[in-house]
Amino acid sequence: MSDSPYRVTTGAVARRLGVSPTTLRSWDRRYGIGPSVRESGRHRRWAPEDIAVLEEMCRLTTSGVPPAEAAGAALSRAGRPPGADTAPVPAEPAPPPQPPQPSQPAAGVRRGRSPGSGNGLPLGEVRHEFRGLARAAVRLDGPTMDRLLTDLVATHGLVTGWEEVMAPTLHAVGRKWESTDERYVEVEHLLSWHISTALRRIACAPPADPEAPPVLLSCVPGEQHTLPLEALAAGLAERGLPMRMLGADVPAQALTAAVRRMGPSAVVLWSQSRHTAGPTLARMVANTGFGIKGARTRPLVVLAGPGWANRPAAPGMLCPAGLREALEVLGRHCRPPSSPRAFGEAVGG
């Protein structure tokens, strides 16, 4: 049979769906989700109706349905009993045995199953029920990412969602890009955008006391990585604490001007890289006073991010180890004053 424009190769289907060709062959062999027609030499060629079954399989597995159940449902909806219309194929050699895992996962975390648990991404110990986020990201499936991120925060809370799903998935995409010839740049950008969108929805919540001095969040000059800082902003908003986000690559003069104008209770300086972490800037912010003459106040300076690692913090500065610790530190320090007027008097309002 000659090639038909309506029947495409396994590699082309895999690229379209964002899964590996090995995963498609495994689904065919294990669950009978294969092409309805095979070319000479038993090469798989996929018709539109075959691809529709695969799309349904991908949708279900991304939603957390186990592969075997997803396969049965996808075939049933297409009116195809499992394995009924696929010719038997020779068994493929079993993969080599994997070395034993050195440790057990943390409580509440389960390892994903293969094949296709994350489309080949090194997901580590991402929560099993949300490994579909990686599959949706590789398929560039924005609506599914939005739904999964919303369910994640609603079910497990922001901190757990960030530490056990969002950040590990982002890191997995980055590691895949660095360690292979597969270019996941578009995947990383789209995933970052959807995670940022989910975090900003939370950060828009009104504070418990709008008159309380806010926490000022800023990336240091030259720093473009904002997502961890956006996670902190969302965590503060979730706790009812007011905050102001300046974002990426804030010039030193603009940062100190904002401190003088705003009178924040604390300033968080985010640095992803040691090259951008500037102790001089941190001291300058810590020494920036505000308020009426004779009663000036200075903010607590929180040095956040791996760029500050192994740098000694000056007196009055804190270096939290992660999002959870940063929220605990700021929550203790930034409790609203007993009355809204107290802050206005302190800054001469």
Image: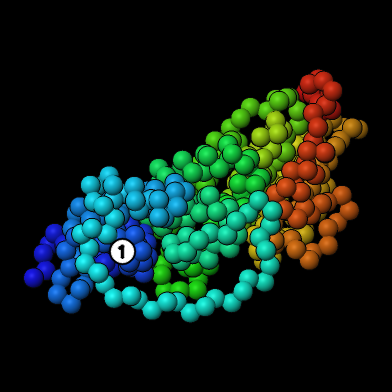
Image height check: is 101 above or below 117? below
Image spot of residue 13 (x, y percent):
27, 62
Task: Report the front residue among 24 and 81.
Answer: 81
Image spot of residue 122 (x, y percent):
53, 66
Task: Report the front residue among 339 and 261.
Answer: 339
Give me the residue at 38% from left, 79% from top.
Answer: 93
Q: Mark 1 points at which residue?
A: 28
Image height check: is 153 above or below 89? above
- In this view, which residue lies farthest toward the right? 294
Give me the residue at 69% from left, 53% from top.
Answer: 107
Image spot of residue 27 (x, y percent):
35, 62
Kind of residue at disc 1: Asp
Q: Which of the 4 image quarters holds residue 84? A: bottom left
In the rendered structure, the answer to whether residue 249 lies left or right of residue 252 reads left
In the rendered structure, the answer to whether residue 293 lies left or right of residue 196 reads right
Q: Which of the 4 image quarters holds residue 168? A: bottom right
Q: What element carries label 1?
A: helix
Give me the residue at 47% from left, 55% from top.
Answer: 134
Image height check: is 309 above or below 285? below
